[in-house]
Amino acid sequence: KNEVEQSPQNLTAQEGEFITINCSYSVGISALHWLQQHPGGGIVSLFMLSSGKKKHGRLIATINIQEKHSSLHITASHPRDSAVYICAVKNSGAGSYQLTFGKGTKLSVIP
Amino acid sequence: GAGVSQSPSNKVTEKGKDVELRCDPISGHTALYWYRQSLGQGLEFLIYFQGNSAPDKSGLPSDRFSAERTGGSVSTLTIQRTQQEDSAVYLCASSLGLGSSYEQYFGPGTRLTVT
C-alpha cells in the first residue's frame, strides 16, 4: 500500500507570500493529483501529473519520480487560496485505478 | 456542461436504518469512483466502476456496504444497518476512462450523519 505524506499539515501565510506544499509517497506511481477542497465545498482537481512540471495561473506543480516527491507552489498568495490542498497518487501496476490520498494541508492566507 | 452530481446533499438517519446515496457522473464518463471522508480523516477509496462492472471492491469497509451502477451511468451506494462510524462525507468522481491519463472530476458529496 502506498503511504502518502504531506507537509506541512497546517500553513498560515500573509497575502502575497510564496507558498510551498510538499507531498511524498512510498511506492512507484503512474500519476499524482493535486486537489483543492474549500470549507463546505466539493473537491476540485488542480493538476494531474506524471513527470516534470505544470503551471496554471499562479499555481505550479512539480514532481520528481526518482525521489518520489511532489510540490505545489502558489505564487502571490491571496485569501481566496485558503483551502485544504490534498495530494493523491495512483499506483502503477495493472489494475491499480484507485487513488490513495494524503491527509491534506490546510492553508490560511491572511489579508 | 454539467458536472458530477450527488444526492441527497445531506442525509440524517437513525442507527440501524438503510441509506442509499446516488451519483450522476458526467455524461460519457465510463469510470466512476466512490470515496469517503470521515471527520478529521483523509479521503479513502471505497469502490470503482468501469461501465457497470466493479472489478475492485477492496475498499468497501464491511459487507454492509454495496454499490451498483446501471446503464453505465447512475451509481448507487447502499449502506445497510447504518452505524455511527458510517457518518462521513461520501464523494463520487468520474473520469472518461481508467488509467493514469484520465483526470477525475468530483461531485459535491453527500454528508451522512448517523444518530
Image (cartoon, coloured by chain):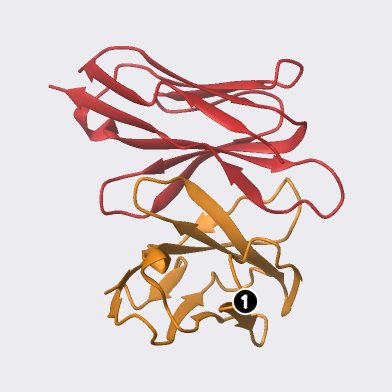
> What residue is shown at x 23% (from left), y 34% (from top)?
A80
- x then y, percent, for residue A97: 73, 53
Figure check: B50 above or below A21: below
Tell me which chain the residue with mark 1 is part of.
B
Figure check: B76 above or below A14: below
**In this figure, which residue is indicated by the disc labeled 1?**
B63
Q: Type of residue at label 1?
A: Asp
> What residue is shown at x 40% (from left), y 64% (from top)?
B85
Residue A98 makes an appearance in the image: yes
- x then y, percent, for residue A19: 37, 16
- x then y, percent, for residue B104: 58, 54
Looking at the image, residue B105 sits to the left or right of residue A38; the answer is right
Give the chain coloured orange: B
Figure check: B57 above or below B52: above
Looking at the image, residue A35 sits to the left or right of residue B66; the answer is left
Outermost residue, left side: A111
Give the chain coloured red: A
Outermost residue, right side: A94
Residue B58: image quadrant is bottom right
Dot 1 falls on a residue whose secondary structure is loop
Crowdedness of circle 1 by 10 Å Cα count: few (<14), some, many (20+)? Answer: few
Residue B60: image quadrant is bottom right
Figure check: A28 above or below B15: above
Q: Check the picture and name the quadrant holding the C terminus of chain B.
A: bottom left
